[in-house]
Amino acid sequence: MKKLSTSTIVIIIVVAILGIGGCSSYNGLVKGEESVTAAWAQVESQYQRRADLIPNLVATVKGYAEHESSTLQAVTEARNKATGITIDANNMTQEDLNRFQQAQDELGKSLGRLIAVSEAYPDLKANENFKDLQAQLEGTENRISVARQDFNKAAQAYNTSVRSFPKNIFASIFGFEKKAYFQAAAGSEEAPKVEF
């Protein structure tokens, strides 16, 4: 039996270490990507919950505020636009996420106008169904905020992994790419003006 040379043994050890490191890096990247996908599913779930509340809210307001049809129509159109945008978490780009976020922001603004309309209708404000829907909507907005924060944290952990050496080598080889982040809405850096 032929004895292996020292250089052959060193090469075998180096290849084995790289193979084990590669498997570990690949599995870590998969785990990170799955965390981002799960966090995205929570974001979508919370936005869907909000979208599901809107028809009942619109119907309740409609019963009290018939002449506010343009506001009700704007909410319905914004809801349809927001629910019509779907994003695959595995192929998400910043442009996709920005488009999704813009549609959701428009829906949020139209909901704000709808809630403001209720101020002009004391009977509507006193309606138990309206108050319950409004409370559910407020709770959902809080859940959306938390889900977006969790998504950004998962994306940050994944992106750090994808960009860190030596995992960046394996990420490049196996096609793992950075994930997009939710960003603050345009104009949110300015404090709102309060006038008395």
Image: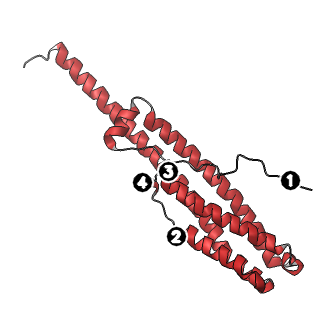
Q: CA distance from mark 1 to mark 4?
A: 42 Å
Q: Nearer the viewer, mark 3 or mark 4?
A: 3
Q: Nearer the viewer, residue 17 or 130?
A: 130
Residue 71 at x, y = what percent?
71, 76
Placement of 26 over or under 86, stated as above or below: above
Callout 3–callout 4 Cβ contact below 8 Å: no
* Residue lying at 43% horizontally and 39% vertically, measured from the top left: 28
Task: Give the residue type at disc 2.
Answer: Gly
Callout 1–callout 4 Cβ contact below 8 Å: no
Q: Nearer the viewer, residue 109 or 144?
A: 109
Displayed quadrant of residue 88:
bottom left
- Mark 1, residue position: 194
Residue 82 at x, y = what percent?
57, 67
Q: Along the polypeptide, which appears first: circle 1 or circle 4?
A: 4
Callout 1–callout 2 Cβ contact below 8 Å: no
Q: Along the polypeptide, which appears first: circle 1 or circle 2?
A: 2
